[in-house]
Image (cartoon, rainbow, N blue to C red):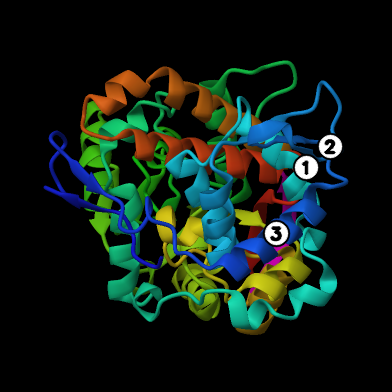
């Protein structure tokens, strides 16, 4: 199953007719399904979870208080795992083959043991059984626009339903004793701007506009901002929000790829955009920061990171996240960032902070808001399969940060004079 979901009336905000090619007809291979069942049983035998199958069969090492996974349709579930475990596990949730009353808590032990869920002797088979990323999802200038369109142009109303009022779609940074998402998002933005030393009179380039929150915050400091996006939906709403804030004279929003950036800037910031760049283009991305930054200028970067050994093991794999959420996406590792910056730029990393636990809290807020506001989201035309897709996506990511498998970093960089 390599096709992605499609819609009729793609740009309409109402009346969507969703199609999920192949989702409700998992490919059948009795041998692979049987093998997948054995691998799954091996993986959960020591995990602190409870897996319930029809007929009373129980798997896992969890106690009464452990999270529960209920496999509703084991035949379809194991056929999906046998066809492609990296995609089939999430598709099984989308299709209702398994369920959980707290999928983030359930997935956290899986994420913590990600490296050894599959027995090591079987891991050498990855190159033959893992799907590869499609060539058309490479992040060329044209490919990147198509990839971004599939996620960020879904609907501004969808994102407004679960984000805070700043419309910030990246990890917040919570102050001690506070659980207010909006305050934490502004604190995160200020942290990035401080790393780039953005102040009154700064000419700032932002790579990845989002819906304009950072540009507005920087302009209120007295900076002049040029911000780049390749999402038409985001550009439209960002410009409206900037105008309502009375800052249209200080912020210019351009529909432009980062590789097409030109000019000379005192500072550059980019918040969780590099994950959409792709490994083939990491040198180009950092070279662009270097090229447009004045000598003595500073960079504020926020990036999601994974363990370096897992990056090396999985960087060519095609996963559920690629197929349904972020086509062309690729997380970095700290060594990958350090090596690319050192080899391809005159930049030096000067500061670093970790916000991994904050991202877990951020995602929990988003998932709660998404489910609480599902009726209004559904009213715009999204179907129940989409709801399960996004619930799994937000839970899957939350589990990654809760377990420590994933981290998110704020990095400060300086360009030598």
Dominant SS type (magenta): strand
Circle 3 — which element?
loop
Of labels 3 and 1, the one closer to you? 1
What is the CA distance from the residue labelled 2 to the residue labelled 3? 23 Å
Q: Are marks 3 and 1 in contact (CB under 8 Å)?
A: no
Dot 2 surroundings within 10 Å: few (below 14), some, or many (20 or more)? some
Q: Say above or below: 315 vs 188.
A: below
Q: Name the spot of residue 184 as percent of width and height, x first.
A: 59, 27
Mark 2 or 3, nearer chain start: 2
Q: Name the spot of residue 307 as percent of width and height, x first.
A: 75, 62
Q: Are marks 2 and 3 in contact (CB under 8 Å)?
A: no
Of labels 2 and 3, the one closer to you? 2
**Residue bearing the label numbered 2:** 48
From the viewer's side, name the closer residue of 291 and 301: 301
Q: Say above or below: 183 vs 402.
A: above
Dot 3 surroundings within 10 Å: few (below 14), some, or many (20 or more)? some
**Span colored in magenta:** 347-354
Dot 1 surroundings within 10 Å: few (below 14), some, or many (20 or more)? many
Mark 2 or 1, nearer chain start: 2
**Residue bearing the label numbered 1:** 109
Q: Quadrant of the C terminus?
A: bottom right
Mark 3 or 1, nearer chain start: 1
Q: Name the spot of residue 250 as percent of width and height, x first.
A: 29, 42
For image coordinates 43% across by 46% down, the residue present is 201
**Residue bearing the label numbered 3:** 306
For image coordinates 69% across by 69% down, the residue present is 311
């Amino acid at each position: 199953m390599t096709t992605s979901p499609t819609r009729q009336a793609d740009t309409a905000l109402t009346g969507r007719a969703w199609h999920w090619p192949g989702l409700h007809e998992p490919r059948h291979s009795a041998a692979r399904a049987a093998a997948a069942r054995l691998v799954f049983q091996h993986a959960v035998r020591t995990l602190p979870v409870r897996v319930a199958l029809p007929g009373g069969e129980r798997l896992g090492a969890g106690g009464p208080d452990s999270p529960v996974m209920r496999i509703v349709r084991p035949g379809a579930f194991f056929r999906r795992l046998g066809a492609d475990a990296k995609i089939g596990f999430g598709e099984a949730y989308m299709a209702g083959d398994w369920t959980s009353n707290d999928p983030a808590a359930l997935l956290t032990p899986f994420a913590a043991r990600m490296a050894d869920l599959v027995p090591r002797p079987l891991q050498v088979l990855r190159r033959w059984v893992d799907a590869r990323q499609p060539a058309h999802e490479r992040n060329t200038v044209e490919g990147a626009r198509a990839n971004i369109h599939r996620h960020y142009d879904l609907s501004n109303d969808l994102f407004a339903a679960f984000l805070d009022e700043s419309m910030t779609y990246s990890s917040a940074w919570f102050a001690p004793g506070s659980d207010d998402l909006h305050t934490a998002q502004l604190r995160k933005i200020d942290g990035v701007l401080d790393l780039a030393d953005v102040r009154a009179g700064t000419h700032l380039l932002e790579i990845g506009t989002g819906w304009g929150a950072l540009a507005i915050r920087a302009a209120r400091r007295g900076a002049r901002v040029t911000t780049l996006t390749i999402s038409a939906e985001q550009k439209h709403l960002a410009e409206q929000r900037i105008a309502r804030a009375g800052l249209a004279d200080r912020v210019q929003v351009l529909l432009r790829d980062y590789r097409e950036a030109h000019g000379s800037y005192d500072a550059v910031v980019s918040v969780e955009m590099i994950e959409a760049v792709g490994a083939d283009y990491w040198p180009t991305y950092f070279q662009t920061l270097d090229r447009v930054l004045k000598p003595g200028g500073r960079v504020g970067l926020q990036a999601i990171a994974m363990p370096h050994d897992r990056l090396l093991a999985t960087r060519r794999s095609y996963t559920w996240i690629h197929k349904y959420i972020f086509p062309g996406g690729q997380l970095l590792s700290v060594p990958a960032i350090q090596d690319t910056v050192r080899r391809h730029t005159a930049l030096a990393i000067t500061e670093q902070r970790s916000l991994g636990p904050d991202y877990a809290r951020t995602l929990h807020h988003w998932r709660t808001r998404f489910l609480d506001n599902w009726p209004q989201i559904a009213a715009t035309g999204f179907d129940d399969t989409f709801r399960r897709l996004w619930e799994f996506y937000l839970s899957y990511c939350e589990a990654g940060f809760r377990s420590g498998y994933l981290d998110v970093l704020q990095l400060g960089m300086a360009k030598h004079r």
